[in-house]
Amino acid sequence: MRVKIGFEIHEQLATRTKLFCTSPADYRDAEPNTNVCEICLGLPGAKPMGVNADAVEGVVAIALMLNCEIVQEPVYILRKHYDYPDLPSGYQRTSMPIGRNGELAGVKIWEVHLEEDPGKYDPVTGKVDYNRSGVPLVEIVTAPDITSPEEARAFMRELVKVLHYSGRVRREGGTMRVDVNVSIEDGARVEIKNINSIKGLYRALKFEITRQKNLRRRGRAVKRETRAYIEEQMITRSMRTKETAEDYRYIPDPDLPPLRLTPELVERVRSQLPEAPHQKLQRFMQQYRISKDDAWAITSEPELADAFERVCKEVEPLRAAAFFRHIIKKTLNYHNLSFAESGITVEDIVEVLQAMSSGRLSQQAGELVIREVVQQRRRASELVQQLSRVDERSLERAVEQALAENQKAVQDYLNGRKEAINFLLGQVMRITGGRADAAKALQMLRERLS
Ligand SMILES: [Zn+2]
């Protein structure tokens, strides 16, 4: 049965202030309901101060990176009415489309809007925190071009990458919200709300598609409705039958003049656009002559890609690429951290790679240093000291000690049981705390035993 999936994605813009007032847009360290003013609280009589120009430019930049055309007609700010405790004014302000007819990874981008975040309502305690009320959001609406949960996951990863590359959205995590609409065989469209991770999106879709298919198999109709994704149980649950656009009673906000996205503004934003992920990937393959797989891994986040370019000023790119993909990415994935969160610096990476190429550090020790930098937040310079291979003189002493303490193994070797040398090598490694160059130690053992 054919599945059709489309998205509405909301992400907070990384502006200094909120959309219609001067309250800070970053409320992460604030006590509940302290990062507010009469405007973002929607108190009676409070009027918006006009639209935050940074937020408008942010949405234009994102729309351009999603290959949209920018709307040239006046863009009205609409009031979208609904009744919920997170919205004291009774309406949410949302712009008409700013970008249209875009495309990313084979999925059509229908519209890109600017919107204000509502407050945060906790239905369990009944408490509302208005700290985020009025924070600017970009809203991205896709066509229902996606046909499976796997495709949905791949597309969302690509979209998140573009948003991060744009430099215009919050990176601290946990602020993205996705509404998904899904239908099978042209049946009724079901919307799933309350998804805030790619993993959650994948699970919600898996569950919802199975639910709809089971209904169809039993000859029952799929109702047009809105369902909530319940993260803990990995299921979706009916919230309400779907509102139609009329239910929201959209009207242009009389307090706000429409936005004019002049060709000059659009050109200025376009000329300052950062490199898109796919452009960076192509450039890395050509400029550094690295494989597509390496370039793909390294361009997965902009900070990682920047670090790679800085490391390449000191280290041969092919070696750096292998280290980034196989050691750094592996460690980040294991800890589920982004490079920016990991605490790894360019200096750390250069230190390790140089110690490895001079032979002071083994491959394994190099990986261990990166792990320790992430886990212990220590610097590579001190760790490399600790984990460096023992020098020639200490290695000789360790070999002598291993031979002296293990006469039986020595005799076995001399009597023709050549594999006894592996035991002796193990002893050398134990004595040196694993910091011996194994090949060199083996060669020394053979010389002594001949
Ligand atoms: Zn405010």
Image (cartoon, rainbow, N blue to C red):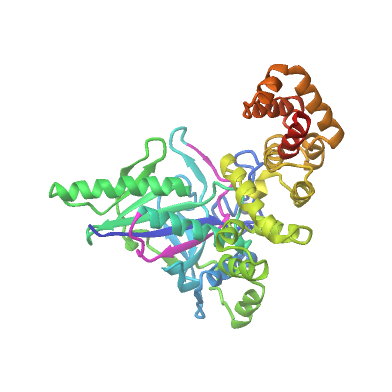
Front in this rendered view, residue 248 or 341 = 341
Above or below: residue 354 compared with residue 61: above
Front in this rendered view, residue 75 or 409 = 409
> Image quadrant for the N terminus?
bottom left
- The spot of residue 370 in percent (x, y) is 69, 42
Q: Residue at x 59, y 80 (%)?
A: 262
Front in this rendered view, residue 96 or 110 = 110
Front in this rendered view, residue 113 or 68 = 68
- The spot of residue 373 in percent (x, y) is 72, 39
Question: In this rendering, does residue 370 appear at all?
Answer: yes
> Image quadrant for the C terminus?
top right
142 magenta-colored: yes
Splitting the image into 4 quarters, where does residue 365 fall? top right
The residue most toward the right is 393
Question: Which segment is the magenta one?
Answer: 127-148
> Does 103 sit left or right of 376 as displayed?
left
Q: Residue at x 84, y 36 (%)?
A: 391
> Does 427 sit left or right of 77 as displayed?
right
- The spot of residue 7 in percent (x, y) is 40, 59
Q: For the image shown, how many numbered marks are present on the structure?
A: 0
